[in-house]
């Protein structure tokens, strides 16, 4: 008689399962910066605006749009090259 197929379960790793969005970025704020962030949130017209979304919006405003300001070439010139300009 043939033996039955063995069923093996894959063991789960430790920790929270991945969400599939992006890696987590942790941030520690000094108390004065945290108070300024909370004051900025209170000034906004959205009552349910949380800190993560507020930080994303502030970063979006503060950082330039890199796609629009894309340089022609990102490769640095080789040392000793005679190419100028």
Image (cartoon, rainbow, N blue to C red):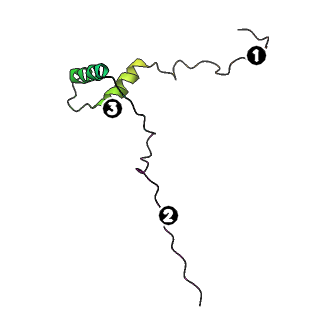
Q: Residue 15 carries which label?
A: none
| Residue depicted at 56% across the width and 20% down the height | 70
As displayed, is residue 61 above or below residue 13? above
Residue topped by disc 3: 52
| Residue depicted at 74% across the width and 9% down the height | 84
Q: Which mark is residue 10?
A: 2
Identify the magenta region: 1-23
Quick check: 62 left or right of 10? left
| Residue depicted at 40% across the width and 18% down the height | 62
Residue 22 horizontal/vertical position (percent): 45, 39
Residue 71 horizontal/vertical position (percent): 60, 18
Nearest the camera: 15 or 43?
Answer: 15
**Callout 3: 10 Å neighbours few (<14), some, many (20+)?**
few
The stretch drawn in magenta includes residue 11: yes
Nearest the camera: 66 or 28?
Answer: 28
| Residue depicted at 25% across the width and 24% down the height | 38
- Indicate which disc, 2 or 1, sits on the residue closer to the N terminus: 2
**Callout 2: 10 Å neighbours few (<14), some, many (20+)?**
few
Residue topped by disc 1: 79
Residue 57 horizontal/vertical position (percent): 35, 25
Quick check: 35 left or right of 63? left
Q: Report the Cα–Cα distance between label 3 and label 1.
A: 43 Å
The stretch drawn in magenta includes residue 8: yes
Q: Quadrant of the N terminus?
A: bottom right
**Callout 1: 10 Å neighbours few (<14), some, many (20+)?**
few
Nearest the camera: 2 or 32?
Answer: 32
Q: Report the Cα–Cα distance between label 2 and label 1.
A: 52 Å
Q: What element carries label 3?
A: helix
């Amino acid at each position: 008689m043939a033996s039955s197929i063995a069923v093996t379960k894959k063991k789960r790793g430790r920790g929270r399962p991945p969400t599939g969005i992006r890696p987590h970025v942790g941030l520690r704020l000094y108390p004065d910066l945290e108070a300024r962030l909370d004051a900025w949130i209170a000034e906004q017209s959205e009552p349910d605006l949380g800190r993560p979304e507020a930080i994303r919006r502030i970063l979006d405003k503060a950082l330039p749009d890199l796609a629009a300001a894309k340089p022609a070439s990102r490769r640095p010139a080789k040392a000793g090259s005679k190419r100028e300009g």
